[in-house]
Image (cartoon, rainbow, N blue to C red):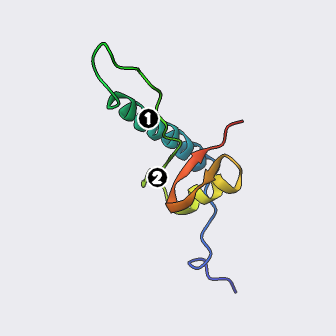
Amino acid sequence: MVDSETTPEPPSKEELRLAMKAFRKRLKLTRLDDESGMGYGATSSGQKSGIVAITPPNQFPKTVWQELAKQGKLKHDRGGLYSLVES
């Protein structure tokens, strides 16, 4: 007999969709924040952010991020960071 508490349910499609949406938004805001702090004034070079990986939003469990990485939508980097897989 399998104990339901030891085998967690896989994340639903809706949960995965919402997690990806939250991840993209967090990545976008992190990049914008980084770009706004790079320089100011008329002589600023306006460089793009070099941020490619972030810690995923904590309102979703770790299993959601692992499943998205398994599906090839995210790439798991060192230190608990994830990045978008460019298609």
Residue denoted by label 1: 31
Of the two numbered discs 2 and 1 on the same chain, state the one appearing first in sequence.
1
Label 1: few (<14), some (14–19) or many (≥20) C-alpha neighbours in 10 Å: some
**Residue 35: x %, y % from top left:** 39, 30
- Identify residue type, mark 1: Arg
Q: Nearer the viewer, residue 6 or 73?
A: 73
Decide: is 4 above or below 20: below
38 relative to 24 in the view: left or right = left
Residue at coordinates 71% horizontally, 49% vertically from top-left? 72
Which residue is at the far bottom? 1
Q: Nearer the viewer, residue 78 or 1?
A: 78
The C terminus - image quarter: top right
Q: Which mark is residue 55?
A: 2
41 relative to 65 in the view: left or right = left
Q: Which mark is residue 78?
A: none
Tell whether label 1 touches label 2 (CB within 8 Å): no
1 relative to 20 in the view: left or right = right
The N terminus - image quarter: bottom right
At mark 1, the secondary structure is: helix
Residue at coordinates 32% horizontally, 15% vertically from top-left? 43
Decide: is 43 above or below 27: above
- Identify residue type, mark 2: Thr
Which residue is at the far front? 43
Residue at coordinates 48% horizontally, 39% vertically from top-left? 27
At mark 2, the secondary structure is: loop
Q: Nearer the viewer, residue 59 or 55?
A: 55
Decide: is 45 above or below 9: above
**Residue 39: x %, y % from top left:** 32, 26
**Residue 80: x %, y % from top left:** 51, 60
